[in-house]
Image (tube, rainbow, N blue to C red):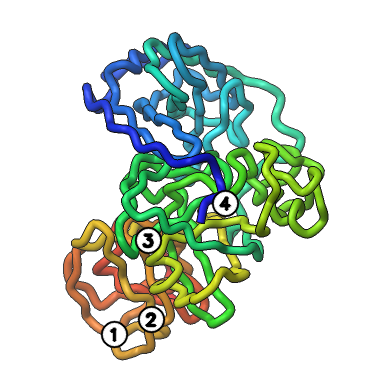
Amino acid sequence: MRYLLPLVVGAALTVGLAAPAQAASNEWTVDASGHAVSWGGAPRIGLVELGTHRLARPANAVTAAVTGDGVVDVRGLRADGQWTEWYEAPATLPVTTSTVQARVVLNSGKAAKVKVSAYTAPAAAEDVSALAAGRSYRVYATREGLVGGTTANGHVIRSRDHFVALPSRRGLAGNNSGNYSVQVCASNGRCEWAPVWDVGPWNTKDDYWNPSTTREMWKDLPQGKPEAQAAYENDYNGGKDQFGRAVANPAGIDLADGTFWDGLQLSNNAWVTVTYLWTGSGPVGTVRTSAANGTVNVRSGANSSSSQVGLAANYAQVRVTCQLTGESVSGTQGTSNVWYRIASGKHVAKAYVAGVSGATSC
């Protein structure tokens, strides 16, 4: 479960959902008061996602100023069509981009005007480049629970829900979005693909999967080692998290109940292997089911008679290694006999995966 401050659930302000189209420019202003606010998480935050903006000139750095409450996160569109992580402005992005998106992070109150400016700056000492398979680390997983509560992106937690929490909002996806998703695998061989919809456990600025040059806090720790693990095992930071609380377990990821019990079939907190899929490269697709909190079976082969070896949650993004012909299946994306291999010995039916382009034959 999350070991953060007490959960406070807020309502959503729903005045206007999208920013008006703007002419290409490297400096623009948005009226944030006309956008929806999603409240949730612990500590409580409000997220206001602003529209994407096409730049007049490619840039790799962004500054932002907000009138009212909050700070501004920004991200850039990569050449492969995927987004970088979110970075709190002012920020140097890991790529030079022609498309930028901003979001306001509120602590209380409201944001009014947001002024954003993009420019060219010296590149970071070490680029956060995409690896083929994505970065993967072994971390300790705990069960989040908190059914009926609200995640940091405004999602109301359901019974046996399917999502994960990471201790940094840099990889926090929007509600009903999976552009930041993980592959979590247990020692029993089962895996689940799930979106990142909450922030925690313990810390909120510990993007431990990133190298020290770009990691937001705890830059002296080895890449892939959560601060909570270092505090618990090595008395790092006096055994405390960023809020000064004694760390009671080494957790680097929280799992929603359905991910914990049904996807991975865990009965206790455990060490798992997590792949942070947005750090990878290659074809991607989005899992879509008819049920809002539904899942798709992941099979050992390209047919429904093969053993179930895991689950893929609705809205989760999956990396497609290759595609092969198998049993014909009908789903949300039509009828097809194509199956996608999303890891060694792990397959999902194309009939439930949207948006895949460029997959090669196995």
Q: Which residue is mark 3?
A: 162
In the rendered structure, the answer to whether residue 318 lies left or right of residue 129 reads left
Pick whichever of labels 4 and 1 is earlier in the sequence: 4
* Whether label 2 touches label 3, CB < 8 Å: no
Quarter in which the C terminus is drawn: bottom left
Q: Nearer the viewer, residue 346 or 261?
A: 261
Q: Residue at x 33, y 13 (%)?
A: 31
CA gap between label 4 and label 3 equals 21 Å
CA gap between label 2 and label 3 equals 18 Å
Q: Which residue is mark 1?
A: 304
Q: Residue at x 47, y 25 (%)?
A: 107
Q: Which residue is mark 2?
A: 299
Q: Residues within 10 Å of mark 4 (few under 14, many from 20)?
A: many
In the rendered structure, the answer to whether residue 84 lies left or right of residue 351 reads right
CA gap between label 2 and label 1 equals 7 Å
Amino acid on which disc 1 is placed: Ser
Q: Residues within 10 Å of mark 3 (few under 14, many from 20)?
A: many
Q: How many numbered dots are placed on residues in this image?
A: 4
The secondary structure type at the circle numbered 4 is helix
Q: Which residue is mark 4?
A: 279
Could you say where residue 8 lies in the image, as x and y percent from the top left? 40, 37
CA gap between label 3 and label 1 equals 22 Å
Pick whichever of labels 2 and 4 is earlier in the sequence: 4
* Whether label 2 touches label 1, CB < 8 Å: yes
